[in-house]
Image (cartoon, rainbow, N blue to C red):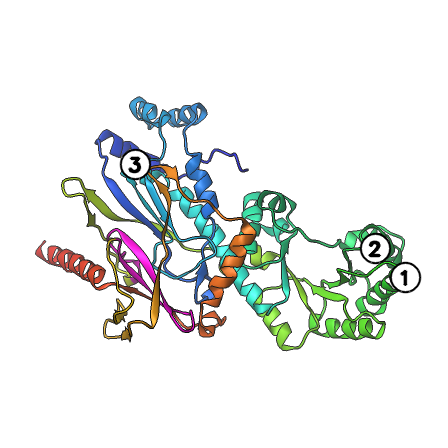
Amino acid sequence: MSTLNLTLLTDLYELTMMQGYFESQSSEVVVFDAFYRKNPCGNGYAITAGLEQVIDYIKNLHFSEEDIAYLKSIGIFHDAFLDYLRDFHFEGDIYAIPEGSVVFPHEPLLKVIAPIMQAQLVETAILTILNHQSLIATKAARVVRAARGNGVMEFGLRRAQGPDAGVYGARAAMIAGCIGTSNVLAGQLFDVPVKGTHAHSWIMSFPDEYTAFKKYAELYPDACTLLVDTYDTLRSGVPNAIRVFREMRESGIELKNYGIRLDSGDLAYMSKKARKMLDEAGFPDAVISASSDLDEYLIDSLKAQNAAITSWGVGTNMITSKDCPAFGGVYKLAAVLDKSTGKFIPKIKLSENTEKVTNPGNKKILRIYDKETCKIRADLICLADETFDETKDMIIFDPLETWKKTRIKGGTYKLREMLVPVFLGGECVYTSPAVMEIRDYCAQEIETLWEETKRFTNPHEVYVDLSDQLFEIKSGLLAQMGHEALSK
C-alpha cells in the first residue's frame, strides 16, 4: 500500500482538462484551496488528517509506461500530450495545516500553488485523502471526548469500506486520541499500539466456558481480558472469569492488564452488576471493557447512567462515521499569477447558495488566541502578504453579517500562522511527525477550544472571519459580477 502508484487515482476530467491546457499552451501559475463548508457530525470543529499520505502521493507522482498505455487505449488522448506525461513531475508549492489541528469551515486546509496542469491533476487524490482521514479523525475525537478520559480502542477494520479505509481510518482514529487499534497492519505501518481480546468462537470451540478462559489466561497472562457474554454474562461468564483470576493469583501470577469485556445486553446494568461481583471477589482493579455498536451518544448515555465501564471498544460507527459518511471537502481555484506584475489576480466562484461562494486570492490563516487562557478567539483568513501587530487593537467581523463586530484589545491576544510550507518548488520541505506525536499534538489542539465548542449538540461556532483587505476584494468581485450580469 505504501508503494502503490496513485497517479491514476483521479477523475477523468482532470486529465481531459490537462490535455486542454496542454494544447492551448496554458501554463499559468494558479492557487487552489482545499477546504470544507460544514463541520461533520454536527460538531463545532473538525480535525485535519491525511497530510502524510498527501506527501507520499506527491513524491511518487509519475506516469508509468503502463499508465501511458492505458490512457492511450481510452482513445481520447493525443500522442503529444501522452509524451508530455512521460516526464511529468510536480514542481509547485504546497502549504497545509499540520495534521491533528482543529480546523473550521471555509479556511484552506491545504493550498497548492503550481502551473495549472499540475495543480489540476492533484485535486482528486488530495481530496479523497484529506476528506476520509479528516472525517474519521473528527468522529473519533467525539467518541474519545464521550469516554471522558477512559481509553478508547479502534477496532472497525472488518466493517470499514475496504482495506484502505480500515488502515487509514485506524490512523486517523489514533490521531484523534484512541489508545490502540485492533488493525495489525496499521500497527506495523504507523507504529501505533495494537490491542485486542478474543471472539465468541474461541469460547465456543472449547467444551465449556471455564476451560476456554483458563487456556486463554495461560497463553496471555499479562493481557487477559475475557469475553463474558457468550452464554450467560452474570450467571456463567463473570463467575468463570473470577474463578480463572483467582487461580492465576493463587499460582503466583501477578494480575495486570486483566478484566472482562461485555459485548451485548444492557451495558449499564451488566457492568454495574459485574463490578460488584468482581469487587466482592477481591478484584477491584479488574477492567470492565465494553463494545457492542458504540458511538459517542451511547457512551455519553452510559456514562450518565454511571456504567462501571472504563474501557471502550468502538468499531462500525467510528470507522465509517456512520451518521455522517462524508466530509465534504472541495478544491477551488482562488487566484491566477499575473506574469507581468508577479502578483496574484484573485478569482471567485459564485453560487446561488451563499455558503458556496469562495474566498478569492492567495491567502493565509491566522489563528487568534486569548493570551490569558490560550483558547481560540477566532480564525482570520487574510491575504498571504498581510501583517498584523499584536500590540494593537484588532477588529474582526462576521463576513456575512458584517454588523457583528468584536474588538480584541492589543496585548491580550497572540497570532499563529496555520498554513506551513510542505513542498517548495516541487521539493518536500516538511517532515511528518510520528502518528503518536500527532496524537499528542491533537490533544493539545482540542484543549485550545472552549468547552461550549466541544459539546455534541448545538456547539458554539468558532468565528472564521476575513481581513478588511480580503473582504474588500471579495465584495468588489461580487459587485463587479453583479454589474456585469445586469448589463447583459
Q: Residue at x 39, y 62 (%)?
A: 104
The reply to whether dot 2 and dot 3 touch (C-beta < 8 Å) is: no
Which range is magenta?
355-384
127 left or right of 189 in image: left
113 left or right of 277 in image: left
Query: Tag 3 or tag 1, which sits nearer the N-term?
Result: 3
The reply to whether dot 1 and dot 2 touch (C-beta < 8 Å) is: yes
Query: How crowded is the residue under tag 3: few (<14 C-alpha within 10 Å), some, or many (20+)?
Result: many
Foreground: disc 2 or disc 3: 2
Residue at numbered disc 3: 117
Query: Tag 3 or tag 2, which sits nearer the N-term?
Result: 3
Q: CA distance from mark 2 to mark 3?
A: 60 Å
Q: Does dot 3 land on a helix, a strand or a loop?
A: helix
Which amino acid is tagged 3?
Answer: Met
Quarter holding residue 382:
bottom left
Q: Which mark is residue 217?
A: 2
Q: CA distance from mark 1 to mark 3?
A: 69 Å
Residue 462 within the magenta-colored segment of the rendering: no
In this view, the residue in front, 338 or 199, is 338
